[in-house]
Image (spheres, rainbow, N blue to C red):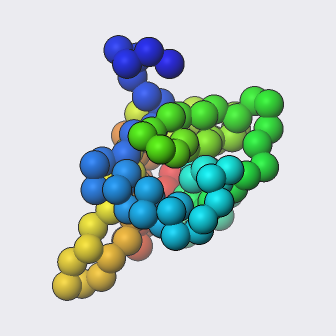
Amino acid sequence: MSTTETKPFILTDTAAAKVAELLKAEGDPSLALRVAVRPGGCSGFSYEMFFDSDFADDDIKVPYDGFQIVIDAASAPMLTGASLDYKDTLQGAGFNVINPNASRSCGCGNSFS
């Protein structure tokens, strides 16, 4: 992917720093952050994120500085143009997916349709 191409899924600087920190703590350089969409949740679909080293031939790999994001082919259309942010506030800390493909989402922010 050239530097002029748009990444199909982006991380804010804060999210990228947190992912890099978490991956470093894992101590396994073969791991990538897998982002997926699964059926379920109160709005129809839910986001799933975990570290993974098992990749399929049709996975989409999005390179970042020092790590990569991996998205399965079935989830890719629902995540194209989406971004991942990380916030650490008095109310709590966590990742949040901002997805322009979602027509609605639930109050918890973990489910969409």
Residue at image position (61%, 42%) is 70
Residue at image position (19%, 85%) is 90
Residue at image position (37%, 51%) is 16
Q: Is residue 7 above or below residue 15?
A: above
- Residue 64: x percent and y percent? 45, 39
Residue 2, located in which quarter of the rendered image?
top left
Horizontal placement of 17 versus 69: left or right?
Answer: left
- Residue 94: x percent and y percent? 37, 71
Q: 44 or 86: which is nearer to us?
A: 86
Q: Is residue 37 visible?
A: no
Residue 52, located in which quarter of the rendered image?
bottom right
Q: Is residue 94 above or below residue 98?
A: below
- Residue 111: x percent and y percent? 50, 63
Horizontal placement of 2 versus 34: left or right?
Answer: left
Q: Is residue 6 above or below residue 52?
A: above
Q: How many marks?
A: 0
Q: Residue furthest left?
A: 90
Horizontal placement of 74 versus 70: left or right?
Answer: right
Q: 22 or 15: which is nearer to us?
A: 22
Q: 75 or 68: which is nearer to us?
A: 68
Residue at image position (34%, 56%) is 17
Horizontal placement of 79 versus 13: left or right?
Answer: right
